[in-house]
């Protein structure tokens, strides 16, 4: 009977411990899906779906993106790798990628003066807003794919 009276105290102590752990310094790791392991894919940004990523892959691979950034975004003669997570003109967030792909990167902003500027909206592709979001979703996803 004595142990039954300890049960509420044990539960309250455990809950307090969990709350204290959650208030520790925030992690810099990408958010993971609940109940997932370290090998799980990061949670996609709001509004990004696997279908949007697939459309972005198709646009990236079939358009001017691949010519500069290489097959699968591994980097090319005129564009850096998009898989490393090391960003030159954005912070790697989905919204920042949308802004860069929409506006492009003018010559004066290039870190490497031997490269050509990136034209906004894929240059001759003239991507729609939805297509910009799709390519951004694809680039966001490959930058987090550590395979």
Image (spheres, grey):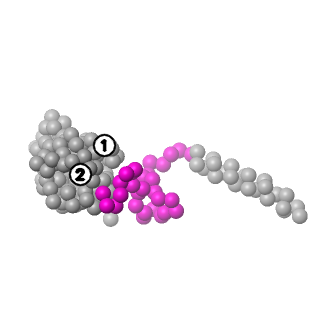
Query: Of callouts 2 and 1, which one flags the residue occurring earlier in the amino acid sequence?
Result: 1
Identify the residue shown where x is 58% and y is 49%.
22
Q: Is residue 119 left or right of residue 84?
A: left
Return the x and y of residue 71 as percentages of the image width and height.
Answer: 18, 61
Q: Is residue 1 left or right of residue 48?
A: right
Return the x and y of residue 110 as percentages of the image width and height.
Answer: 17, 39
Label 2 with label 1: CB-CB less than 8 Å:
no
- Compare residues 119 and 18 and report the one nearer the observer: 119
* Total tally of numbered discs in the picture: 2
Place residue 107 in its image quadrant: top left
- Give how far apart the Cα atoms at labels 2 and 1 are: 15 Å
Q: Is residue 22 above or below residue 54?
A: above
Checking the image for residue 131, the label placed there is 2
Residues shaded magenta: 24-52
Q: Which residue is mark 1?
A: 96
One can see residue 143 in this view: no
- Label 2 Cα neighbours within 10 Å, binned few <14 / some 14-19 / many ≥20: many
């Amino acid at each position: 009977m004595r142990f039954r009276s300890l049960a509420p105290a044990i539960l309250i102590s455990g809950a307090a411990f969990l709350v204290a752990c959650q208030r520790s310094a925030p992690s810099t790791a990408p958010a993971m899906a609940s109940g997932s392991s370290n090998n799980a894919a990061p949670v996609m940004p709001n509004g990004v779906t696997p279908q949007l990523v697939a459309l972005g892959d198709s646009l990236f691979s079939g358009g001017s993106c691949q010519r500069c950034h290489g097959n699968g975004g591994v980097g090319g003669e005129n564009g850096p790798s998009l898989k490393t997570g090391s960003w030159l003109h954005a912070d790697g967030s989905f919204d920042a990628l949308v802004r860069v792909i929409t506006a492009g990167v003018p010559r004066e902003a290039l870190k490497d003066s031997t490269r050509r500027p990136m034209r906004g909206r894929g240059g001759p592709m003239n991507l729609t807003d939805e297509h910009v979001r799709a390519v951004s979703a694809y680039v966001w996803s490959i930058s987090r794919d550590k395979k």
